[in-house]
Image (spheres, helix red, strand yellow):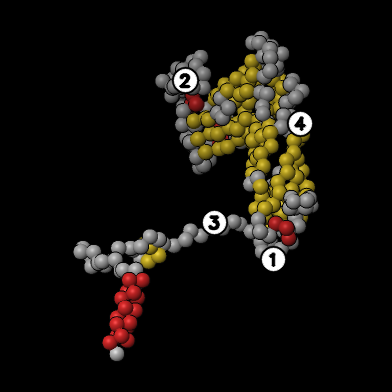
Amino acid sequence: MKRIAAWLLLAAAVGCRSRPAEPPPTRASGLRPRASGETASGPRPIDAPKLLPSLAFAPAIVELVASPGERRSQDARIIGPLAPQAHLTIEHVDDPALDVQPLTPDGSDAAGLRLAFVGDRAGVRTGQVVAATGLDEPPRVTLLYSLRVPSRITVTPSNPVFDLRDPAGRERRLEVRGRGPAFRATAVQVLAGPFRATVGADGAASGGVAAIRVSVDEPAIRGNPEHGFLGRLRIDSNDPAQPTADVPLYAMGALPPHPPASDARGHVGNEPIQGGDATAKAR
């Protein structure tokens, strides 16, 4: 019996030594220190993978830059988990000048769109193309685009503002420059807004720098309660690569309901300085 009891004591001692000891409680909290990989609220969470859209375009935005008369194109393919199952058909294109053709899957490339653009009027315009996917979800995808045609004609100021509250601010002088001294401004046309415009100098006598006079059509807006008017001016030129250039116009404020009365000497109240330009201040 003594031998059996000795074997039992030996087995118990070996078992105690084989188990790792628990860390002692800390004095501050009475709890054992956190093991590696744990936080105060439990095990440290594993970072979830970033969720990708089921369908998207690459690139997300197509940017086309074309000189007048130049053709540029770029392809955009769809990516995402559902890309192999999608077949695109065009539903809507914002700009009628943009040619959009669907692309079928090609090797490792999924379906996509080809955007082509021939440079026309100078400026930048943006829009979107909407295409049906043939899937229940998402039923359609949208591709954004930007079209830019560099201008050969420089207008200063490029965005003239007219102050209807100041008689001196109701007319502006625009400087128009082209490519070289042979440039001429041949005509002007107000496409929108209560404005009038004339060619003051076509550029022949000033080395290709033309001058355009633009003024507010005061009788057209006299008594109008609106406090702001938008317009657009078109300048015709002898440049075959860019025969026209458009300029935005903006008039702020409102005219008084009646024109100012002249005094006995024929002077009008708040009359602008004689010989000053559109930026000159009234007396």
Residue positioned 63% across, 23% down in the render: 154
Return the residue found at the far bottom: 1
Q: Amino acid at mark 1?
A: Asp
Residue 243 position by quadrant: top right
| Residue 144 appears in the picture as rendered | no
Compare marks 4 and 2 and give the one earlier in the sequence.
4
Q: Which residue is mark 4?
A: 70
Q: CA distance from mark 4 to mark 1?
A: 39 Å
Residue 61 position by quadrant: top right
Q: Amino acid at mark 4?
A: Glu
Q: Amino acid at mark 2?
A: Ala
Q: Nearer the viewer, residue 27 or 203?
A: 27
Compare marks 2 and 1 and give the one earlier in the sequence.
1
Q: Position of residue 37 (x, y in %)?
A: 40, 61
Q: Which type of secondary structure does the marked residue at label 3 adopt?
A: loop
Q: Nearer the viewer, residue 41 or 126?
A: 41
Q: CA distance from mark 4 to mark 3?
A: 41 Å
Q: Which residue is mark 3?
A: 50
Q: Amino acid at mark 3?
A: Lys
Tell me if label 4 and label 2 are in contact, CB under 8 Å: no
| Residue 95 appears in the picture as rendered | yes
13 to the left or right of 101: left
Image quarter hosting the N terminus: bottom left
Which circle, 3 or 2, is nearer the viewer?
Answer: 3
Residue positioned 28% across, 87% down in the render: 2
Q: Which mark is residue 136?
A: 1
